[in-house]
Image (cartoon, rainbow, N blue to C red):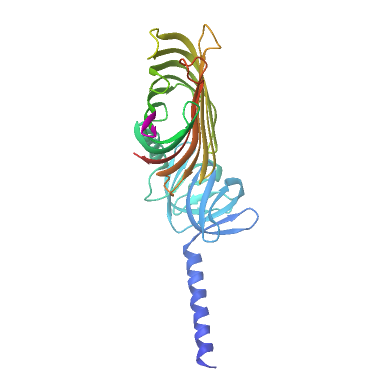
Amino acid sequence: MNFLTIFNGMKHSILLALTLQASLIADQVTTTDGSVLVGQILGMQDGNLTIKTEFAGKLRIAHPQIATISSEDSFSIRLEDNRTYNGVIVSREDRTLGLEERATNFELKEIRQLWPDGEDDPLILSAQKTAQGLLLQWKHALGFDLAGSSGNTDDFGLGIRLDSTLANKMREYDFYLSYNNSTKKNVTTVDETKFGAEYDSRFFEELAWYAKTDLENDRLEDIDLRATTALGLKYSWLDNQSFKVSVRAGAASRYEKIRSSTDDFSEPALDLGIEYKHRFRDTLAWESDLTYVPSVSKFSDFLLSQDSALVIPLDKTMDWNLRSGVSGTYNSTPALEKEELDLKYYLRLVYRFD
């Protein structure tokens, strides 16, 4: 027997011993079909036990599929009647569970929550999460545009936009301020400033009321001030990780002061809109906002505005985004010698921060 053979034999013996020791120390869950899962029990919630294994990561097992549980560690257990115990779990022959050195028995279906000793109580964590969700928190986004336009102008320019949101699960305040400027042969062709604010207050899971106002100054369109104020209801039609669709409807007021005219325009109107967001994957999303504001007295007199863009995150934290989109306004009654459609396309670099 040479040295290499002796070394390989010792190596295999050591590996076998370490494997046996790990299996003795690790938690074990036996399922009703005889499978044995070895790993670390992380807890139990809503009738599902979570165990972290080396080969498959975290696994969730429904309690009807569990035959026995074995662990050397101590756990805290809360039953459905809110009785709470601490100790090392042992499996009884009648497929019930108990605790070492205690005569108490209970079934898996009676367990409301289970968590390792030394970790935070799930009820406390849930209360903290709920309280955190009620806190109003600021989020901001600063964007820089490389923009183009067609319609009243055909050129390129630069723009800047600041968005701020103060929100929790029940209320949300949104503000934006944007400025676009473009020149052609040293002549200003775009000089547009916009400001908007919106307040949403949710009073049902899917229903909220909103109040919003949008202000605009556009020298190209000869508009000193265009103001739209609206109050109405917003309905979250779809809201999940991939899709978000909201529709809104309300009463509005339109006001326009045109530089070339002595008569100001002021009319009651309707505010109708749809907001759509679709996240295809972590690296791509589509966002669109469409607003239709017709005058009450004459539906052929309306404003139609939209902003649609493809959003591409540039880092894993999604602090930096590239937004490529089209925005514009269709005014059915434009100023004299001005076109109805004012369309802009842009490439915006956006930085999000709290």
Q: Is residue 23 visible?
A: yes
- The quadrant of the image that shows the N terminus is bottom right
- Residue drawn at x 52%, y 61% is 54
Is 272 displayed left or right of 228 in the figure?
Answer: right
Indicate the position of residue 326 as horizontal and vertical percent values: 50, 33
How many numbered dots are placed on residues in this image?
A: 0
Residue extending farthest bottom: 1
Q: Which of 143/116 is in front? A: 143
Q: Which of 126/184 is in front? A: 184
Indicate the position of residue 5 as horizontal and vertical percent values: 54, 88
Indicate the position of residue 96 as horizontal and vertical percent values: 55, 49
Question: Residue 267 lies in what quarter of the image?
Answer: top left
Q: Which of 167/21 is in front? A: 167
Query: Residue 34: within the magenta?
Result: no
- Residue drawn at x 38%, y 41% is 351
- Residue drawn at x 41%, y 45% is 320
- Residue drawn at x 45%, y 59% is 72
Residue extending farthest front: 185
Residue numbers of the magenta segment: 182-189
Q: 37 above or below 210?
A: below
* Secondary structure that dominates the magenta span: strand
Q: Which of 12/246 is in front? A: 246
Q: Is residue 166 visible?
A: no
Indicate the position of residue 37 as horizontal and vertical percent values: 56, 58
